């Protein structure tokens, strides 16, 4: 259903993104990414590494690294996918927010809510609208 390919949206060293290998219907589960949580007090150590740009808030007292393809979804203010935290299963569950065509890159809003237009930590000061 999904694969990792070179993304035109990313200009970093790796330039990767998650792409649909078939049509995906709105609401369909795309991926369940297992969580590797750590306490927020430990984040000062992660901040010293490139991993700081890839972690997700995981409840009030934890931050999480996502395994599987979880850390490879790129950002868009007009996402075609969303995610929900599944604390019972310790996963981030990614769903199609709109219909997604085969070959299309799957994008999430890093702010957590699909319509949240707040600047991202790495884009502060840019006009994202």
Image (tube, grey):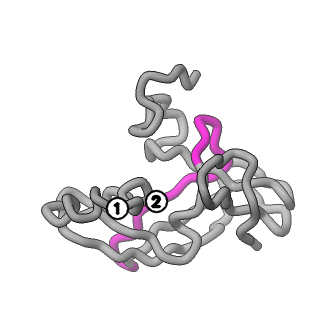
Secondary structure beneath label 1: loop
14 left or right of 127 in image: right
Mark 2 to mark 1: distance in Å? 26 Å
Residue pictured at 54% horizontal, 74% vertical: 32
The residue wearing badge 2 is 84
Percent from the top left, x then y, of residue 63?
Answer: 28, 63
Labelled disc at residue 25: none
Picture residue at 28% right of the left edge, 56% below the top: 47
Q: Position of residue 34 (x, y in %)?
A: 45, 78
Of the numbered discs 2 and 1, the one sitting upstream in the chain is: 1
Q: Residue 1 placed where, x, y %?
A: 76, 73
**2 vs 1, front mark:** 1
Q: How many marks?
A: 2
Mark 2 crowdedness (10 Å alpha carbons): few <14, some 14-19, many ≥20: few
Q: Height in image: 114 above or below 106?
A: above
Residue annotated with mark 1: 49
Corner quadrant of residue 6:
bottom right
> Badge 1: how crowded within 10 Å, few (<14), some, or many (20+)?
few
> What is the quadrant of residue 36 in the picture?
bottom left
Q: Is residue 43 left or right of residue 24?
A: left
Examine the structure image and report whether residue 87 is included in the region drawn in magenta.
Answer: yes
In the image shown, does 47 or 79 lie closer to the viewer? 47
> What range is drawn magenta here?
75-89
Q: Residue at x 71, y 48 (%)?
A: 98
Between 24 and 37, which is closer to the camera in this rendering? Answer: 37
Q: Looking at the image, which is closer to me, 15 or 29?
A: 15
Q: Position of residue 37 (x, y in %)?
A: 29, 73
What is the quadrant of the C terminus in the image?
Answer: top right
Query: Is residue 73 highlighted in magenta?
Result: no
Given residues 107 and 115, the one toward you in this image is 107
Tag 2's secondary structure? strand
Residue 105 is left or right of residue 73, and the answer is right
């Amino acid at each position: 259903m999904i694969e990792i390919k070179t993304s035109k949206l990313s200009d970093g060293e790796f330039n990767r993104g998650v792409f649909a290998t078939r049509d995906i219907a709105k609401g369909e589960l795309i991926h369940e990414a297992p969580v590797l949580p750590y306490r927020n007090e430990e984040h000062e150590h992660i901040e010293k590494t490139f991993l700081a740009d890839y972690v997700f808030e995981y409840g009030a007292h934890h931050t999480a690294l996502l395994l599987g393809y979880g850390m490879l979804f790129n950002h868009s203010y007009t996402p075609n996918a969303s995610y929900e935290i599944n604390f019972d299963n310790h996963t981030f569950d990614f769903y199609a927010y709109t219909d997604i065509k085969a070959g299309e890159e799957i994008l999430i809003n890093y702010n957590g809510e699909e319509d949240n237009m707040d600047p991202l930590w790495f884009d502060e000061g840019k006009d994202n609208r």
